[in-house]
Amino acid sequence: MAAARPARPAGPATGSAGPARPTAGSVGPAAASVLDAHLAALAAALLPYRRSEELLARWGGELAHRLAAGGRLLVAGNGGSAAEAQHLTAELVGKLRDDREPLSAIALHAETSALTAIGNDYGYDEVFARQVRAHGRPDDILLLMSTSGASVNLVAAAHAGRDAGLRCWAFTGPTPNPLADACHETLAIASPDSQVVQELHLVSTHVLCEYVDRVLPAALAAAGRVVPAASGAAGRAVPPAAGVPPATGAPDGPVRAGVEVVLDDGTGRQTEAG
């Protein structure tokens, strides 16, 4: 006869209140405290960040004029900042909101074959600097993104850009830092939290592109280029950004205000009224 098996301890009856078990998607006090702490860090950085408006407006105007004149934006970053940099170039080559012509912007880290070849042959510190020397032209703009501002390959790229005559900008965390020192101008996020820094870098990307779009029609006109209307739409007038000088030069022919109506007097001659 087989030996009797020991009985298993009885569990709670179906429907009875047993010990609480965490379920997927449950939010407890620990989760809430993580969110609260993150939002508190973000809120602390937002107040000083508001002072970045004037800088982003000026950068957007300058970038619009450089791109309208045939210049190029080169962007680079490492890790999460690489994703941020690629987000920026996508907004410019594609669009932010309204349809417009594509603008020349290259994320250097996205050129994977060149990146790995340069890293293999010259070392990782040179992966961006060598591309800057290859693609950059005087008066192009180089924007480098880093939460720490201490990435050696970005600092090397800034030095290469300045040597080649590029205008060098940086998105970083708190200053002072080596990248800010190597660039002409820096937008620095006053937060010790790298996540908060990257989140406000993304906000800065969107605001920068917004100012580019506002100034672009005037920049294209100043460069003697036709401003194309959006596909299937008449387009819209966009006011220039604050701090950006108005476009110089006048269009060919007189500028007429008001509404013009063309009348036919029955003899084949046309007269204008209004």
Image: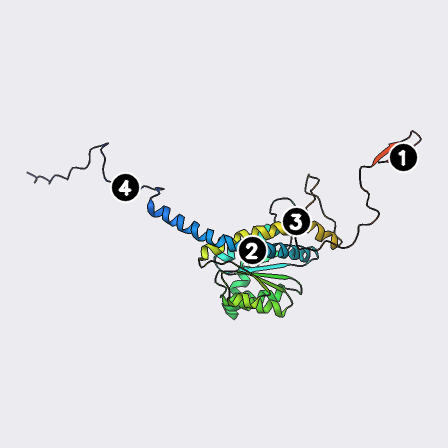
Pointer 3 or 2: first along the chain: 2
Q: Are marks 3 and 2 in contact (CB under 8 Å)?
A: no
Q: Quadrant of the C terminus?
A: top right
User: Of the residues tagged 1 and 3, which is closer to the observer?
Assistant: 3
The amino acid marked with disc number 1 is: Gln
| Residue receiving disc 2 | 51
Callout 1 crowding tier (Cα within 10 Å): few <14, some 14–19, many ≥20: few
Image coordinates of residue 53 in percent, x first then y, are: 58, 53
**Of residues 256 and 269, which is closer to you in this image?**
256
Question: What is the distance, in whole Å, between disc 1 and disc 3 at their CAs?
Answer: 39 Å
Q: Secondary structure at mark 2?
A: helix
Q: Mark yes or no: residue 132 visible.
A: yes
Pointer 4 or 1: first along the chain: 4
User: Of the residues tagged 3 and 2, which is closer to the observer?
Assistant: 2
Q: Secondary structure at mark 1?
A: strand
Q: Secondary structure at mark 3?
A: helix
User: Of the residues tagged 2 and 1, which is closer to the observer?
Assistant: 2
Q: Mark yes or no: residue 129 visible.
A: no
**Of residues 68 and 149, which is closer to you in this image?**
149
The amino acid marked with disc number 2 is: Arg
Q: Are marks 2 and 1 in contact (CB under 8 Å)?
A: no
Image coordinates of residue 15 in percent, x first then y, are: 24, 31
The amino acid marked with disc number 3 is: Arg
Question: What is the distance, in whole Å, between disc 4 and disc 3 at their CAs?
Answer: 54 Å
Residue with the most extreme right position: 267
Residue with the most extreme left position: 1
Q: Residue at x 71, y 53 (%)?
A: 219
Q: Quadrant of the N terminus?
A: top left
| Residue receiving disc 1 | 270
- Is residue 2 shown left or right of residue 178? left
Pointer 4 or 3: first along the chain: 4
Q: Which mark is residue 214?
A: 3
